[in-house]
Image (tube, rainbow, N blue to C red):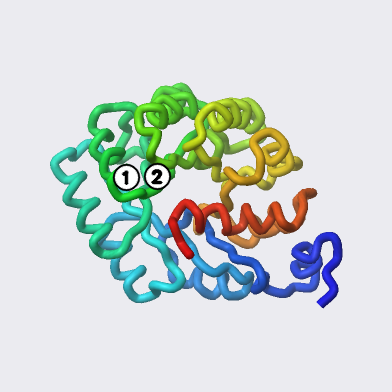
Amino acid sequence: MIRSSSWIRDCVDAGQPLNDVLIIDGLTSVHLPFLKVMDRLGVDKACVQGSPDVILPVIQEYPDRFIGMCRVDPNYPDEVLPTLERSFNGGMLAIKLHPAAHTEYYPIDGPNYRPVFEFAAAHQAPIIIHSGPRTEVDLRLNRPYLIAAVAQWYPNVNFIVSHCGAYDAKETWEAMDEAIEVTNANSNIYLNFNTLGRYYGVLEYLVQNVGVDRILFGSDEPQHSLLAEVGHVAYAKISDSDKEQIFGLNMARLLNME
């Protein structure tokens, strides 16, 4: 097949699934009808985050499609390690932390997260951390500068800043500049731009200022649309080789997948 300068865009224009591209959705919640959407778009795998009670049955039933991300609550420190051990013994490969969630509300640099980071180092497990929006609370709990401090404590752990610390146009660029700064200063920090691709030029800006190797695709489905997020990459004004890195190759490397 003769491929144009943007065969990925052409494929999407034609309404065809991107079956020739490895696509790993780097952040979703459990949503089994999501499989139909994945198939329609050509998404190979999706990382699903949650407790072992919720996630283990899903990844065991669909081991070729879903990758488990264990989520723990730092407010119950005695349960953190047992939860992680059960999750990884059952096949999970990564960890999701949400410091500003109403049920957790605990700073990412707080001591109750230390066992999580040590476990991740021992298991070579990447950690994705919710970051943003830039409210007073979130800046105190999960801003990119705080994640960078943790990344410096644990240089052998790969940390993923979710949302690049932002959510909407009012804060996108300020948050991204902070996320870019800490990513460029720390080789173990990566950026998942989920929910930000809707704003014109975001992905191009990240590639220009960080480089393509540390940018990860994600949808945050079902809160946000996988269809829209695929489109943001497919139509970005970057090369198709860069799109392939972002869509799945970078995440596959972080997860030590063949």
Mark-to-mark CA distance, 2 and 1: 7 Å
- Image check: 91 left or right of 207? left
From the viewer's perspective, is residue 223 above or below residue 162?
Answer: below
Which is nearer the N-term, disc 2 or disc 1?
1
- Give me the residue at 51% from left, 53% from top: 220
Image quadrant in which you'd find residue 63: bottom left
- Residue at 70 percent across and 52 percent down: it is 242
Identified at 47% across, 35% down, the residue is: 131
Q: Amino acid at mark 2?
A: Ile
Residue at the image point whose x is 69% and y is 44% from the top? 203
Marks counted in the figure total 2
Q: Which residue, given by chain and number where applicable, does mark 2 sit on? A: 127
Give the quadrant of the N terminus: bottom right
Q: Residues within 10 Å of mark 1 (few under 14, many from 20)?
A: many
Q: Is residue 204 left or right of residue 41?
A: right
| x, y percent for residue 192 | 55, 45
Judging depth in this view, the residue of 137 and 46 nearest the camera is: 46
The residue mark sitting in front, 2 or 1, is 1
Query: Mark 2, residues whose alpha carbon is within 10 Å: few (<14), some, or many (≥20)?
Result: many
At numbered mark 1, what does the secondary structure look like: helix, strand or loop?
helix
Q: Are marks 2 and 1 in contact (CB under 8 Å)?
A: yes
Label annotation for residue 99? none
The image shows residue 181 at horizontal and vertical percentages of 58, 26
Amino acid type assigned to the residue bearing label 1 in the image: Ala
Disc on res. 120: 1
Q: Position of residue 142 (x, y in %)?
A: 42, 30
Residue 82 image offset from top left, x and y in percent: 17, 50
